[in-house]
Image: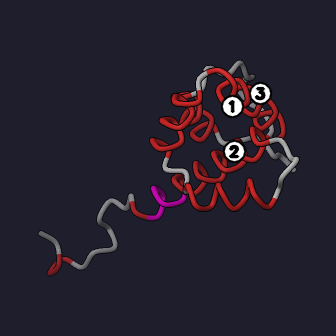
Amino acid sequence: MDNSVDTGILDAIRVDWPLVLPEKCTEEQLLSVLSVEINRLINHDFSRLIAILYRIDISEPKLKILLSENKGSDAGRIIAWMILERQKEKKLSRQKYSGKGGDIPEDEKW
């Protein structure tokens, strides 16, 4: 089974993160590299991390819950996982709502 990350999701993540990744990479590879960068931002540029998470639309309450439930775990890894999951949600939403209008009856079209 191919568990490569979709190129559209990789491209969306690369917008905010200067990651060195192969064209095709697994979720594990992505999470490992992304978590290192997130941990770097936690320690050296926290305000930039917050701005990126806000722009990506990461749920702050959900993040707080996950971090509190996983004390002692790698916060960068948890945040990386949330970013990946959020990008997957966005992709599904775009696919769902990007219809070309073919499903709309003629009498309801503008």
The kind of secondary structure the magenta stretch mainly shows is: helix
Q: Which residues are magenta?
A: 92-96
Residue sitting at x 53%, y 38%:
50
Q: Amino acid at mark 1?
A: Ile
Mark 1–mark 2 distance (CA, rounded to whole Å): 8 Å
Report x, y in % for residue 19. 67, 22
Instruction: Residue 95: say if magenta.
Output: yes
Q: Which mark is residue 79?
A: 2
Q: Which residue is mark 1?
A: 38
Q: Looking at the rendering, which quadrant does residue 34 occupy?
A: top right
Residue sitting at x 47%, y 44%:
54
Mark 1–mark 3 distance (CA, rounded to whole Å): 5 Å
SS category of the residue bearing label 2? helix
Q: Amino acid at mark 2?
A: Ile
Answer whether labels 1 and 3 touch (C-beta < 8 Å).
yes
Report x, y in % for residue 12. 54, 36
Q: Is residue 61 depicted above or below 33 in this figure?
A: below
